[in-house]
Image (spheres, rainbow, N blue to C red):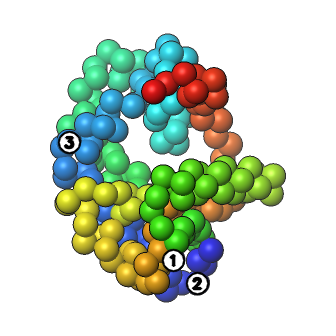
Amino acid sequence: MYQDEDNVQKLGEYAIRAAKIEASVRRVMKETELIFRANEREKNEYRYGFSVEGQGTQGLMRHLMQGMVTLFPSLNVGQAAADTFVKSTQTSVDHTSVYAMIVASENTRSAQVLSGMAYSRLILEAHRLGLAVQPLSQALEEYPEIKAEYDGIHRDYAPGGGSIQMLVRVGRPTQEAPLSMRRDVMNLMMDK
Protein backbone atom coordinates (compact mmCIF):
# COMPACT_ATOMS: atom_id res chain seq x y z
CA MET A 1 0.00 0.00 0.00
CA TYR A 2 1.25 3.47 -0.88
CA GLN A 3 -0.39 6.54 0.57
CA ASP A 4 2.49 8.94 1.12
CA GLU A 5 2.47 11.98 -1.15
CA ASP A 6 5.68 11.13 -3.04
CA ASN A 7 4.64 7.59 -3.99
CA VAL A 8 1.06 8.59 -4.80
CA GLN A 9 2.39 11.26 -7.15
CA LYS A 10 4.98 8.94 -8.72
CA LEU A 11 2.50 6.11 -9.28
CA GLY A 12 -0.03 8.56 -10.70
CA GLU A 13 2.60 9.79 -13.15
CA TYR A 14 3.31 6.22 -14.23
CA ALA A 15 -0.43 5.68 -14.76
CA ILE A 16 -0.85 8.83 -16.87
CA ARG A 17 2.25 8.25 -19.02
CA ALA A 18 1.23 4.62 -19.60
CA ALA A 19 -2.34 5.63 -20.51
CA LYS A 20 -1.04 8.14 -23.04
CA ILE A 21 1.22 5.50 -24.57
CA GLU A 22 -1.58 2.94 -24.69
CA ALA A 23 -3.94 5.49 -26.26
CA SER A 24 -1.39 6.09 -29.02
CA VAL A 25 -0.94 2.41 -29.94
CA ARG A 26 -3.85 1.49 -32.20
CA ARG A 27 -3.55 -2.29 -31.90
CA VAL A 28 -3.67 -2.08 -28.10
CA MET A 29 -6.66 0.27 -28.11
CA LYS A 30 -8.35 -2.13 -30.53
CA GLU A 31 -8.17 -4.84 -27.85
CA THR A 32 -10.09 -2.55 -25.48
CA GLU A 33 -12.65 -1.70 -28.15
CA LEU A 34 -13.30 -5.41 -28.72
CA ILE A 35 -14.31 -5.94 -25.08
CA PHE A 36 -16.40 -2.77 -24.72
CA ARG A 37 -20.06 -3.63 -24.15
CA ALA A 38 -22.18 -0.81 -25.54
CA ASN A 39 -25.58 -1.92 -24.25
CA GLU A 40 -27.46 -4.32 -21.99
CA ARG A 41 -27.79 -6.98 -24.71
CA GLU A 42 -24.00 -7.13 -25.16
CA LYS A 43 -23.38 -7.12 -21.39
CA ASN A 44 -25.79 -10.01 -20.92
CA GLU A 45 -24.32 -11.97 -23.84
CA TYR A 46 -20.62 -11.65 -23.00
CA ARG A 47 -20.58 -11.02 -19.19
CA TYR A 48 -17.11 -9.45 -19.19
CA GLY A 49 -15.48 -6.31 -20.48
CA PHE A 50 -16.01 -2.58 -20.11
CA SER A 51 -19.24 -0.62 -20.16
CA VAL A 52 -20.51 2.96 -20.08
CA GLU A 53 -21.36 2.84 -16.38
CA GLY A 54 -17.90 1.45 -15.63
CA GLN A 55 -16.58 4.84 -16.75
CA GLY A 56 -18.76 6.62 -14.19
CA THR A 57 -21.77 7.41 -16.37
CA GLN A 58 -25.07 6.87 -14.57
CA GLY A 59 -28.77 7.67 -14.55
CA LEU A 60 -30.39 9.00 -17.71
CA MET A 61 -26.97 9.82 -19.19
CA ARG A 62 -26.02 6.12 -19.02
CA HIS A 63 -29.01 5.15 -21.16
CA LEU A 64 -28.38 8.03 -23.55
CA MET A 65 -24.71 7.05 -23.97
CA GLN A 66 -25.59 3.37 -24.45
CA GLY A 67 -28.03 4.36 -27.19
CA MET A 68 -25.55 6.70 -28.86
CA VAL A 69 -22.70 4.17 -28.85
CA THR A 70 -25.03 1.43 -30.09
CA LEU A 71 -26.29 3.58 -32.98
CA PHE A 72 -22.93 5.24 -33.68
CA PRO A 73 -20.14 2.78 -32.74
CA SER A 74 -17.53 5.22 -34.07
CA LEU A 75 -18.07 7.27 -30.89
CA ASN A 76 -16.10 4.62 -29.01
CA VAL A 77 -13.25 3.92 -31.42
CA GLY A 78 -10.19 5.68 -32.70
CA GLN A 79 -9.19 9.09 -31.37
CA ALA A 80 -12.47 9.58 -29.49
CA ALA A 81 -11.88 6.41 -27.45
CA ALA A 82 -8.22 7.30 -26.91
CA ASP A 83 -9.08 10.79 -25.65
CA THR A 84 -11.78 9.44 -23.33
CA PHE A 85 -9.37 6.82 -21.97
CA VAL A 86 -6.64 9.37 -21.15
CA LYS A 87 -9.16 11.80 -19.64
CA SER A 88 -10.70 9.02 -17.53
CA THR A 89 -7.26 7.95 -16.31
CA GLN A 90 -6.35 11.55 -15.43
CA THR A 91 -9.59 11.92 -13.45
CA SER A 92 -8.86 8.66 -11.63
CA VAL A 93 -5.32 9.73 -10.76
CA ASP A 94 -6.50 13.16 -9.61
CA HIS A 95 -8.86 11.48 -7.15
CA THR A 96 -6.50 8.83 -5.77
CA SER A 97 -4.85 9.01 -2.37
CA VAL A 98 -3.94 5.33 -1.95
CA TYR A 99 -2.46 2.78 -4.35
CA ALA A 100 -1.96 -0.91 -3.70
CA MET A 101 0.26 -3.37 -5.53
CA ILE A 102 0.46 -7.10 -5.77
CA VAL A 103 4.08 -8.13 -6.34
CA ALA A 104 5.14 -11.71 -7.03
CA SER A 105 8.67 -13.05 -6.86
CA GLU A 106 8.41 -14.17 -10.50
CA ASN A 107 6.18 -13.80 -13.55
CA THR A 108 5.09 -17.40 -14.07
CA ARG A 109 1.56 -18.56 -14.88
CA SER A 110 1.33 -19.93 -11.33
CA ALA A 111 2.36 -16.56 -9.86
CA GLN A 112 -0.22 -14.85 -12.07
CA VAL A 113 -3.01 -17.17 -10.88
CA LEU A 114 -2.02 -16.73 -7.23
CA SER A 115 -1.90 -12.96 -7.75
CA GLY A 116 -5.40 -13.09 -9.25
CA MET A 117 -6.59 -14.94 -6.16
CA ALA A 118 -4.96 -12.32 -3.91
CA TYR A 119 -6.59 -9.58 -6.00
CA SER A 120 -10.01 -11.22 -5.55
CA ARG A 121 -9.47 -11.34 -1.78
CA LEU A 122 -8.39 -7.67 -1.82
CA ILE A 123 -11.57 -6.64 -3.64
CA LEU A 124 -13.82 -8.64 -1.30
CA GLU A 125 -12.15 -7.22 1.82
CA ALA A 126 -12.22 -3.69 0.42
CA HIS A 127 -15.95 -4.00 -0.30
CA ARG A 128 -16.54 -5.34 3.20
CA LEU A 129 -14.83 -2.19 4.53
CA GLY A 130 -16.86 0.10 2.25
CA LEU A 131 -13.93 0.77 -0.09
CA ALA A 132 -13.67 0.59 -3.87
CA VAL A 133 -10.78 -0.81 -5.92
CA GLN A 134 -9.94 0.06 -9.52
CA PRO A 135 -7.00 -1.28 -11.57
CA LEU A 136 -4.62 1.17 -13.22
CA SER A 137 -2.25 -1.44 -14.60
CA GLN A 138 -1.33 -0.05 -18.02
CA ALA A 139 2.31 0.42 -16.96
CA LEU A 140 2.44 -3.31 -16.18
CA GLU A 141 1.49 -4.47 -19.65
CA GLU A 142 4.05 -6.17 -21.84
CA TYR A 143 4.34 -4.74 -25.35
CA PRO A 144 7.27 -2.88 -26.93
CA GLU A 145 5.93 0.68 -26.76
CA ILE A 146 5.31 0.51 -22.99
CA LYS A 147 8.69 -1.06 -22.12
CA ALA A 148 10.23 2.12 -20.61
CA GLU A 149 7.29 2.53 -18.19
CA TYR A 150 7.24 -1.20 -17.40
CA ASP A 151 10.96 -1.21 -16.67
CA GLY A 152 10.73 2.01 -14.67
CA ILE A 153 7.90 0.96 -12.37
CA HIS A 154 9.61 -2.39 -11.77
CA ARG A 155 12.92 -0.67 -11.05
CA ASP A 156 11.19 1.64 -8.55
CA TYR A 157 8.78 -0.81 -6.89
CA ALA A 158 10.16 -4.32 -7.44
CA PRO A 159 13.92 -3.74 -7.41
CA GLY A 160 14.70 -7.28 -6.23
CA GLY A 161 13.58 -8.76 -9.55
CA GLY A 162 9.95 -9.32 -8.61
CA SER A 163 7.02 -8.89 -10.97
CA ILE A 164 4.30 -6.36 -10.25
CA GLN A 165 1.12 -8.22 -11.11
CA MET A 166 -1.44 -5.52 -10.22
CA LEU A 167 -1.52 -1.80 -9.52
CA VAL A 168 -4.85 -0.56 -8.17
CA ARG A 169 -6.26 2.56 -6.64
CA VAL A 170 -8.17 2.18 -3.37
CA GLY A 171 -10.56 4.63 -1.76
CA ARG A 172 -13.98 5.46 -0.50
CA PRO A 173 -16.45 5.76 -3.36
CA THR A 174 -18.14 9.14 -3.72
CA GLN A 175 -21.10 7.60 -5.52
CA GLU A 176 -22.61 4.17 -5.79
CA ALA A 177 -21.61 2.18 -8.85
CA PRO A 178 -23.28 -0.93 -10.24
CA LEU A 179 -21.49 -4.23 -9.89
CA SER A 180 -19.50 -5.17 -12.96
CA MET A 181 -20.31 -8.03 -15.29
CA ARG A 182 -19.14 -11.48 -14.22
CA ARG A 183 -18.89 -14.67 -16.20
CA ASP A 184 -20.13 -17.90 -14.71
CA VAL A 185 -17.14 -19.89 -13.49
CA MET A 186 -18.32 -22.95 -15.42
CA ASN A 187 -18.10 -20.97 -18.66
CA LEU A 188 -14.44 -20.31 -17.86
CA MET A 189 -13.90 -24.03 -17.33
CA MET A 190 -15.38 -24.80 -20.73
CA ASP A 191 -13.28 -22.19 -22.61
CA LYS A 192 -9.97 -23.38 -23.94
In the image, which disc is placed on residue 4? Answer: 2
Residue drawn at the location 20% of the way across and 59% of the way down:
144
Is residue 73 among what the camera can see?
Answer: yes
17 or 106: nearer the viewer: 106
Looking at the picture, which amino acid does disc 3 mark?
Arg
Looking at the picture, which amino acid does disc 2 mark?
Asp
Residue 49 left/right relative to 100: left
173 or 182: nearer the viewer: 182
Q: Secondary structure at mark 2?
A: loop
Residue drawn at the location 19% of the way across and 52% of the way down:
24
First of labels 3, 2 by sequence position: 2
Mark 2: give few (<14), some (14-19) or many (20+) Cα within 10 Å: few
Question: In which image quadrant can residue 98 be found?
Answer: bottom right
Residue drawn at the location 59% of the way across and 77% of the way down:
2
State the separation of the CA atoms marked 3 and 2: 35 Å
First of labels 3, 1 by sequence position: 1
Residue that carries the numbered disc 3 in the rendered image: 27
Reply above or below: 97 against 81.
below
Q: Secondary structure at mark 1?
A: helix
Report x, y in % for residue 8. 51, 77
72 or 25: nearer the viewer: 25
Q: Is label 3 or label 1 in front?
A: 3
Residue 2 left/right relative to 148: right
Q: Is label 3 or label 2 in front?
A: 3
Residue drawn at the location 63% of the way across and 23% of the way down:
186
Residue that carries the numbered disc 1 in the rendered image: 8
Question: In which image quadrant can residue 100 be found?
Answer: bottom right
State the separation of the CA atoms marked 2 and 1: 6 Å
Reply above or below: 67 against 93.
above
Looking at the picture, which amino acid does disc 1 mark?
Val
Mark 3: give few (<14), some (14-19) or many (20+) Cα within 10 Å: few
